[in-house]
Image: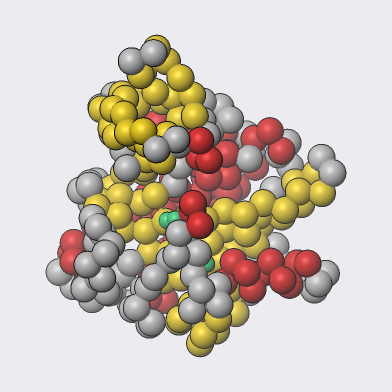
Amino acid sequence: VGQNIVSLKRVDSTNDYLKKQVANSKPVPEGTVILAEEQFAGRGQFDNKWLSQPGQNLTFSILLSPSFLPISQQFSLNIAISLAINDVLCSFIGSGCEIKWPNDIIFDDRKLGGVLIENIIRGTNWKYSIVGIGLNLNQTSFPASIKNITSMALIAEKEWTLNDVLAHLLTAIDRRYSQLKNGGLVLQRQEYRAKLYRLNTLAVFEREGVRFDAEIIGVTETGLLELKTADGVRCFGLKELKYI
Ligand code: BTN
């Protein structure tokens, strides 16, 4: 991972850039990284926009080809990537780092970064994954409309060198991806659970316009969030539920 880094000044979205290359059958080696100083159409989960001050933060995408895994295990890549980011952040800013299901990066109840993984499946084969990562490094002010957001600079009160943090992230991703390839799935699931934000705690959700409280009791093997609700234990996918 990271042998081939393409640095762009301005792009719509690094995920879309890679997606187009793959769609046009351009030969892109596995592990290629597309890094952008500025995205003018950065995307997050749930069709959210990903806004990032140009040049201040890391916004990049990696092309992976997890064809060694069955498509039923797509969530395992979310786990490996979140753990890799968590590994680096724990070493840089301490153990207050947690993973909010499915793969938000949280520090002290605030969002520090997010991951958007888009899988390209052909037939029953998992051909490619475009792993998009946005991590707030040096931005210290955010639009008022974005709640509970933070950056490494705000946490550590220092400025970070983007390329340095990127290099650590790519090494950690390489390590966690190899671990997954070499049978580390069960271990990674346990580690992910241990890092899960609000585990065994009440959290607020919204479903079909109705808000409710539920206790997070875990994540299933396929990546559903397991909740103890007033109606008993229920599991929900990303599209079925809004996590407030
Ligand atoms: C989220 O928190 O909802 C996920 C955010 C993912 C943002 C990154 S920035 C690089 C890559 N390109 C995109 O358009 N999105 C991801």
Q: Is residue 97 above or below residue 1?
A: above
Q: Which of 6 and 143 is in front in this view?
A: 143
Is residue 190 visible from the viewing direction of this image?
A: no
Q: Which residue is drawn at 62% across and 54% down?
A: 118
Q: Residue at x 24, y 57 (%)?
A: 147
User: Residue 95, percent across and down?
Assistant: 24, 46
Task: Place residue 62 in its image quadrant.
Answer: bottom right
Task: Place residue 23 in its image quadrant.
Answer: bottom right
Furthest toward the bottom, the residue is: 9
Q: In this view, does 50 lie to the left or right of 90?
A: right
Q: Which residue is drawn at 39% across and 13% down?
A: 231
Furthest toward the front, the residue is: 209
User: Residue 224, percent across and down?
Assistant: 51, 30
Q: Total marks drawn?
A: 0
Is residue 234 visible from the viewing direction of this image?
A: yes
User: Residue 174, percent across and down?
Assistant: 55, 55
Q: Nearer the viewer, residue 21 or 236?
A: 236
User: Residue 35, percent across and down?
Assistant: 52, 75
Q: Which residue is drawn at 60% across and 47% down?
A: 178
State how the image is colored: secondary structure
Q: Quadrant of the N terminus?
A: bottom right
Q: Quadrant of the C terminus?
A: top left
Furthest toward the top, the residue is: 232
Q: Is residue 143 above or below residue 69?
A: below
